[in-house]
Image: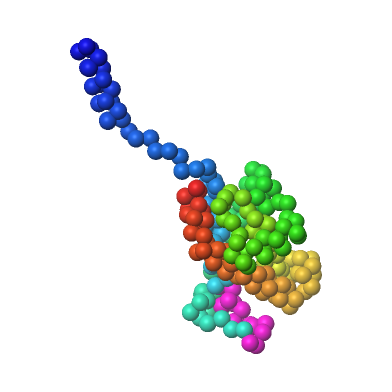
Amino acid sequence: MRLVILLETCAMTLEATSPVVMPAEGPVIHPIWVRVTHWINALAILMMIASGWQVYDASPLFSFIYFPSQIALGEWLGGALLWHFAAMWLLVINGIVYVTLGIATGRFRRKFFPIRPREVVRDLAAALRGKLSHDDLSVYNAVQRLLYVGVILAAVVIVFSGLSIWKPVQFKYLTDFFGGYDFARYVHFFAMASIVGFLAVHVALALLVPKSLRAMITGR
């Protein structure tokens, strides 16, 4: 009897002193490489947009569009160009890593495809009515898939059109592809505008669905 009491006492002591094993918080939605490249991309894109606005002001395409210095980066043309080129290399290198891993791991195929027009219309209508579900963050709806693929393509266009503007002689054929130097500037501008539009929607959704922001920080 004493032996039984002794064993029970030891078991209770071990249970009380053993570390508590917390249950898993759920499956990983965004692996570490997605989170790291996402935030680096965010920084690089914001730097490129803000410095690009300062460059634009030095030679505007539209008389009715001007970007205040408070939201521009670089203070003057030379300084803005330095920021723009520094951010460009960061965006390109990080973008190559992101796209390469996205394709190699099959994440792009699983997350972004297929994109069906009927589903895009359905989910867009649900979103406008405030009835689009965000219960499972690991599955993108049709509108998300379209927007993510669209912004990746816009990023590719903005990089190559930027190269054609930066080195129109060295990249002559690339500049010609965009319709010449002057037209390439318009392509670059509208690609920038589409990315800014995406960011506005992206940030708004992150604020409306805070758990999506948490998932991009913690992975879950």
Q: Quadrant of residue 159?
A: bottom right
- In the depicted view, which residue is nearer to us: 189 or 34? 34
Q: Judge whether residue 90 is colored magenta.
A: no
Question: Is residue 30 positioned above or below 16 on the image?
Answer: below
207 lies left or right of 89: left
Q: Is residue 164 among what the camera can see?
A: yes
- In the depicted view, which residue is nearer to us: 117 or 68? 117
95 lies left or right of 153: left
Residue furthest front in the image: 1
x then y, percent, for residue 177? 79, 67
8 lies left or right of 192: left
x then y, percent, for residue 211? 49, 55
Q: Residue at point 67% right, 65% down?
A: 125
x then y, percent, for residue 110? 67, 47
Q: Judge whether residue 62 is colored magenta.
A: yes
Question: Is residue 59 positioned above or below 97 on the image?
Answer: below
x then y, percent, for residue 63? 65, 88
Q: Which region of the structure is painted magenta?
A: 51-64
Residue furthest left in the image: 2
Q: Quadrant of residue 95?
A: bottom right
Question: Is residue 161 positioned above or below 215 on the image?
Answer: below
| Circle count | 0
- In the depicted view, which residue is nearer to us: 181 or 26? 26
Q: Residue at point 70% right, 61% down?
A: 122
